């Protein structure tokens, strides 16, 4: 049974850091792309980063480029999102999701939620002083 479980969210001050984890069960990460999405109240779900395939190709949305880093530990079947220099506008529920690598390999397809078949339950990140 495929399962994705996020952890690591919480309350942090502006300028602070958090690391989110996405533990993946019953999938081989080399065959999938794992993306991070976020959704703030009243806003659409936004794709912010993805790591995919055996070459661990990484992509980022402009809104997080240079501040967030996605990585993967194949031994633990876990994907991480290191978030630095956090801003109040980063406040959202953060989700990880998995898609077959062929569906997220081209252009901006990695950022489109409908390409992903499996989703975690989400973890809240709040950036506030």
Image (cartoon, rainbow, N blue to C red):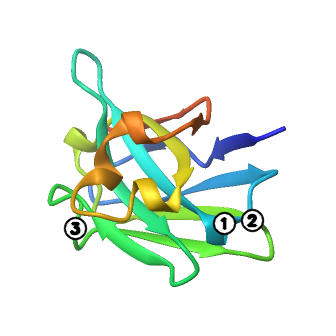
Q: Horizontal and vertical percent for residue 94?
A: 45, 39
For the view shown, which residue lies furthest in the front direction?
A: 102
Q: What element carries label 1?
A: helix
Precedes in sequence: disc 2 or disc 1:
1
Label 1 crowd (10 A; few <14 / some 14-19 / many >=20): many
Query: Residue 58, how many percent across, how many down?
Result: 38, 73
Residue 29, by quadrant, is bottom right
The image quadrant of residue 78 is bottom right
Image location (x, y in percent) of residue 128: 30, 38
Tell me the residue that label 3 is attached to. 65
Judged left or right of residue 45, residue 31 is: right
Mark earlier in primary sequence (3, 1): 1
Q: Quadrant of residue 129?
A: top left
- Which sits in the foreground, 129 or 95? 95
Q: Residues within 10 Å of mark 3 (few under 14, many from 20)?
A: few
Q: Which of 124 and 33 is in front in this view?
A: 33
The nearer-to-camera label among 2 and 1 is: 1
Residue at the image position 58 percent from the left and 35 percent from the top: 119
Q: In this view, does 111 lie to the left or right of 31?
A: left
What residue is drawn where x is 20% and y is 40%? 89
Q: Which mark is residue 77?
A: 2
Whether residue 72 is visible, yes or no, is yes
In the orientation shown, which residue stands out farthest toward the left? 62
Q: Which of marks 2 and 3 is nearer the N terminus?
A: 3
Residue drawn 56% across and 63% down?
A: 80
Residue underneath mark 1: 29
Mark 2 lies on a secondary structure that is loop
Q: In this view, does 72 lie to the left or right of 77?
A: left
């Amino acid at each position: 049974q495929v399962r994705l479980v996020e952890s690591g969210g919480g309350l942090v001050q502006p300028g602070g850091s958090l690391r989110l984890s996405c533990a993946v069960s019953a999938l081989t990460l080399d065959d999938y792309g794992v993306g991070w999405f976020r959704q703030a109240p009243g806003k659409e779900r936004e794709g912010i980063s993805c790591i995919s395939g055996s070459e661990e190709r990484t992509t980022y949305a402009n809104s997080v480029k240079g501040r967030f880093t996605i990585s993967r530990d194949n031994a633990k079947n876990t994907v991480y999102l290191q978030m630095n220099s956090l801003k109040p506008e980063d406040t959202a529920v953060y989700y990880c999701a998995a898609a077959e690598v062929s569906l997220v390999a081209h252009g901006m397809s990695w950022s489109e939620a409908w390409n992903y078949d499996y989703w975690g339950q989400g973890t809240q990140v709040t950036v506030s002083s």
